Image: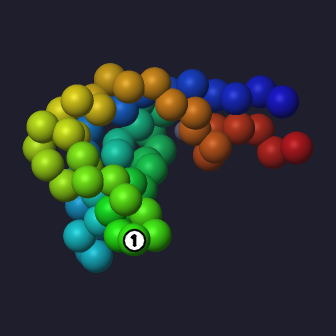
Amino acid sequence: MIVMKTTVTGWHQDEESYWVAELACGHSRHFRHNPPWQVREWVVTPQGRDGFLGSELDCKECDPPT
Ligand SMILES: [Zn+2]
């Protein structure tokens, strides 16, 4: 299985105020802070989001269909 790597290039919020990471490949990824189910306190702070810029992650959208 090939896993495509991409990096985080920016952020925006969706219509529900959840934070969405913009990826270098042109896709995006939601990072929901929705306690107690999904706890990502860092994503609601500018410092936390800044710290994530440039981070490498796998893009499932870029994975070729199997
Ligand atoms: Zn992608």
Q: Secondary structure at mark 1?
A: loop
Q: Quadrant of ligand 1?
A: top right
Q: Residue furthest right?
A: 66
Any part of residue 20 in sight: no
Any part of residue 16 in sight: yes
Q: Nearer the viewer, residue 22 or 34?
A: 34
At a point 51% along the width and 31% down the height, the residue shown is 57
Vertical placement of residue 36 versus 19, above or below = below
At a point 29% along the width and 32% down the height, the residue shown is 52
The percent position of residue 61, horizontal first and vertical second, equals 62, 46
User: Residue 53: which quarter of the image?
Assistant: top left
Q: Is residue 59 left or right of residue 53?
A: right
Q: Quadrant of the C terminus?
A: top right
The three-letter code of the residue at mark 1 reads Pro
The percent position of residue 55, horizontal first and vertical second, equals 38, 25
The percent position of residue 30, horizontal first and vertical second, equals 41, 56
Q: Which residue is mark 1?
A: 36
Vertical placement of residue 7 versus 66, above or below = above
The percent position of residue 12, horizontal first and vertical second, equals 23, 53
Residue neighbourhood size for the residue with mark 1, other residues' Cα within 10 Å, grouped as few (<14), some (14–19), many (≥20): few
Q: Is residue 14 left or right of residue 32?
A: left
Q: Is residue 57 left or right of residue 24?
A: right
At a point 46% along the width and 24% down the height, the residue shown is 56
User: Residue 22: which quarter of the image?
Assistant: top left
At a point 64% along the width and 28% down the height, the residue shown is 4
User: Residue 38: which quarter of the image?
Assistant: bottom left
Q: Residue furthest front?
A: 36
Beta carbon at label 1 within 8 Å of ligand 1: no
Q: Nearer the viewer, residue 46 or 3?
A: 46
Vertical placement of residue 54 versus 27, above or below = above
